[in-house]
Structures are given as structure tokens and as C-alpha cells.
Image (spheres, rainbow, N blue to C red):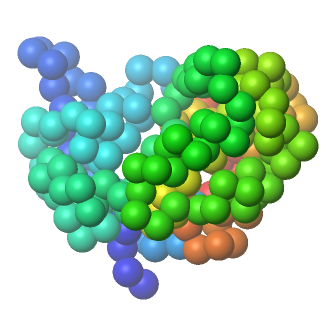
Amino acid sequence: MLEAIIANGLRKTYGDFVAVDNVDLQVNQGEVFAFLGPNGAGKTTTIDILTGAQRRTSGSVSVLGQDPQLDDREWRSRVGVVPQGTAVYGDVTVKEVIDHFGAFYPDPFRTSELIDLVGLGAKTNVLSSKLSGGQRRRLDVAVGVVGRPELLFLDEPTTGLDPEARRESWELVRLLSARGMTTVLTTHYLDEAQELA
């Protein structure tokens, strides 16, 4: 099986503080990989390194066959990222948000298809500021996958959501996985890791 991610001896320090210490990992294409740990364990820092948002201190990393530190535009279009916090898009509709972000990619999802895929079909013309917490998280995922990435990073996708919204988020991860998308998610929740990965 082909690897989407290979990291060996990954390390990140800030002065004397060690945020990530000698991490080795392999994520195969098409799998859902859960990165489990408490706050401060280095999950987000590791994701930032794997997506090219931060430079590692040492170690080697290959993501979709390339070092993310090279920050190649074509490579970036193959990677989707949904950060921890829910984004604030202001007084624009769900459709407008997705149209806007889709314009940055060479082959984005059709807006209507993506809105249906993430379960926001009934909210197409609703202002994003009027969405519930779970719906806003779904919109975040839509923005993260609008470019049809091969690899998706979900950083704590269900933190702060009620149980029903968490289950809906799990269904969305399963749906994306069924479409062949490799997914890396960070979580505090053992049940979430067991359910999805």
C-alpha cells in the first residue's frame, strides 16, 4: 500500500521547550488515522509541520511524496486542512463561502454538490453567522475539502460539539473516507479514535 505520510524522528523545539519529540509515523493512502493525546501533547504542532505551516527542527517528512517545507503550490492543492477553531466568515451565505474558497483551486467541487455532501443543503442561502455550532463545523470541513484534496487534516473536529453534532461529524468523516480521501484527525477522545480510525 502506498504511504500518504512518512515521518521519521520528527522533532520540534522552541528554545529549550520540546513540543514534538522524535515522532515516527506512517499513514497509508485511503486510511483514517487518529492522532490521540491530551492538550499540549504536540498534535497540532505535528499537523502544522505535516502541512508546511511550521518548519521542523529535525527529522524527515514526506507528505504525498514531497517534503512539506518546500511549500509547492501544486502540492498544497492536494492537501486540505480544517484547523481547530471554527472560522468566522461574517455576513455571507454558505454558498458564497464555498464559492469564494473554491476559486483558489484548479478543480474544486461543484458548490451545490459539496453543500449536499457536508449536509448543509437546507442552509445553502443562510448566512454563515446564523448556523449552529455543528453546522459551522460542517462548513469548515467544506472549506477544507473544496479543492478535492487527496489528504485531509482535521484538527480536533468535534471539540465542543454536542453528542448529536459529534455523530454527524463522524458520519461526514466516514463519507469522505468512502470517497477515497486519506484523513488524519487529532482528537482528545478515545471513543472517536476507535470509531473512525
Residue 105 spot, x, y in % from top left: 41, 57
- Considering depth in this image, is 66 or 196 the residue closer to the camera? 66
Q: Residue at x 74, y 51 (%)?
A: 115
- Nearest the viewer among 36 and 29 is 29
Which sits in the foreground, 118 or 190?
A: 118
Q: Is residue 167 visible?
A: no
Residue 84, can we see it? yes
Q: Position of residue 78 (x, y in %)?
A: 38, 62
The answer to whether 38 appears left or right of 61 in the picture is right
The quarter of the picture where the C terminus appears is bottom right
Q: Quadrant of the N terminus?
A: bottom left
The residue drawn where x is 53% and y is 72% is: 30
Q: Is residue 159 left or right of residue 100?
A: right
Toward which corner of the image does residue 161 lie, by quadrant? top right
Q: Is residue 53 left or right of 127 when viewed as pictured?
A: left
Residue 95 image point, x, y percent: 69, 42
